[in-house]
Image (cartoon, helix red, strand yellow):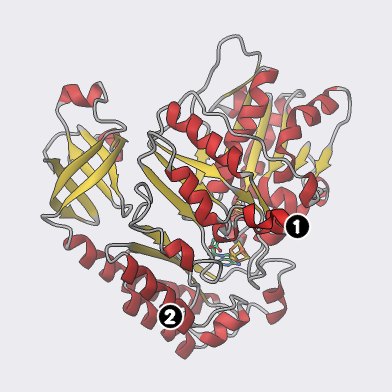
Amino acid sequence: MVAVELKQSENGVSTAPGATRFVHVQTFGCQMNVNDTDRIMQVLAPHGWAPTDDPAQAQLILLNTCSVRDKAEQKMLSQLGRLRPLKEHNDELVLGVAGCVAQQEGAALLDKVPYLDLVMGPDHIGELPTLLERMQRGERRIAETEFYKRKDFRFVEAEPRDETRVSEFVTIMKGCDRVCSYCIVPFTRGREVSKPREMVVREVERLVAAGAREVTLLGQNVNSYGKDLQEGAGPLASRVPTFSELLTAVDAVPGLERLRFTTSHPMDAIDDLIDLFGRLRTLCEFFHLPVQAGNDRILDEMRRFYTVADYRDKVHKLRARCPEIALSTDIIVGFPGETDAEFEDTLRLLEEVRYDSIFAFKYSERPGTRAEKLGDNVPEAVKKARLSRVLAVQDAITRDKMQAMHGQVVEILVEGPSQRAARGTAGQGGGGFQMMGRTRTNLIVNVPVPFGDFWNKRWVGKLARVEIVEVKANTLFGRFV
Ligand code: SAH
Ligand code: SF4
Ligand code: F3S
């Protein structure tokens, strides 16, 4: 997945004309969940529900949750506790948990949290209006977390929202058929199901028509897109689209400027994908390729099904095909039994590959996973120290790479006012009037603009060439050329 940084985002706008009921959703976890929240809003809208940022105004509050690490789950539980008083003041309020914790805990969550009304797994988003109707007819507490059989699963086809952004996400599959020993995702998202290619292309076309210029295709393991369609496809099998074919089809959507995808498993159908870099006009020079660890024994215990040498080979191929490609990765430190020497191998790999950015996590034991049986035996203090070392090594590399950007001319896609501008901080150029854009390699660049251009958003959605004129504390500042 994308930057599976634990984050919480809220659902933008607060009112819609003529709406009688308000829904407040808080989103935790990965982009998949952020996207699911959009689908939740979409299916509720025709039933008269409008989003609100204020939980006290809502008749329905949903926490769309993540359980990839223990901390994420704890965060959700404490958030429920904070919302509890609202239930005491409002008999009508429906309080629900959706997403991965809902899927994992099922009806047991209703027992654990006595003031909770609804537990809904990610497969059931499309049925949310029906579940609410059942509650209105008198059913008090509902848990709906059965997985659908592959052949019965239906995606909710995405429609663009009113506030479509320059850069949008499109889910292309759900679930994960891999069996990484530490990971809960296969339990919370079920088997892989690929969204039909025509539906993906249609969604991208609509987003582009609504103003999007960049699209990121989302899945837990996008490289295995289409494999489930292949099963039982018989004589039609050769016509079932692979991920590379899907990218090629999306690349052809008129008006689309940039195409990204996340996440990939290093061993799934990567070679034909590598060949597309530099060939597809919109495909950006950026690859998130999670390695997790730099030691073969640990990789084997993690059930990643590759060695460090296999991984290195993919990186070499990628860089040979596309020398300017930016790479990022995920790292887990303190996996059960990881020795100091084994951990050092991870540091060595970071030094060798020199990623542009990384996400690093302390191992977190997850219930029901294979790794749970190994015992969470690396002490917390050791995990913490290892995480700091990983981050320190990467910080130095990132700093070097950022400094090397000084004086370069790059193309950015302008997304909107820079966060610095929004906070009113003065950056390069003195005032707070800066736009933010990204390079194809996914670096953020802030560019000062004249007052008038800032307010009329003249640059939003435009591709522009900028020269990097300052690099300060891992932030790039540019000027239009
Ligand atoms: N499907 C994606 C990502 C899934 S979760 C992929 O395979 O890349 C995102 C990241 O969270 C993983 O890459 C891994 O680094 C981390 N992660 C998953 N389970 C974890 C656990 N139990 N403890 C710590 N980190 C974990
Ligand atoms: Fe989890 Fe592995 Fe699947 Fe990624 S590929 S979601 S880490 S099981
Ligand atoms: Fe995403 Fe967290 Fe679920 S990372 S798939 S929301 S467990």
Location of residue 132 with respect to 146 vertically, above or below = above
Quarter of the image with the C terminus is top left
Q: Residue at x 27, y 25 (%)?
A: 457
Taking the view exactly as shown, the residue that stands out farthest to the top is 18
Where in the figure is residue 353, as x and y percent of width and height? 34, 75
Location of residue 390 with respect to 404 vertically, above or below = below
Taking the image as shown, residue 217 lies to the left or right of residue 304, namely left
Where in the figure is residue 269, as x and y percent of width and height? 54, 66
Where in the figure is residue 24, as x and y percent of width and height? 60, 30
Taking the view exactly as shown, the residue that stands out farthest to the bottom is 341
Residue assigned mark 2 = 346
The image quadrant that residue 242 belongs to is: bottom right
The crowding category of the residue bearing disc 1, from other C-alpha atoms within 10 Å (few below 14, some 14 to 19, many at least 20), is few
Taking the view exactly as shown, the residue that stands out farthest to the front is 235
Q: Can residue 404 be seen at all in this image of the molecule? A: yes
Mark toward the start of the polypeptide (1 vs 2): 1
Q: The disc labelled 2 sits on which kind of residue?
A: Thr
The numbered disc on residue 234 is 1
Q: Residue at x 29, y 31 (%)?
A: 460
Where in the figure is residue 10, as x and y percent of width and height? 52, 35
Location of residue 278 with respect to 255 vertically, above or below = below
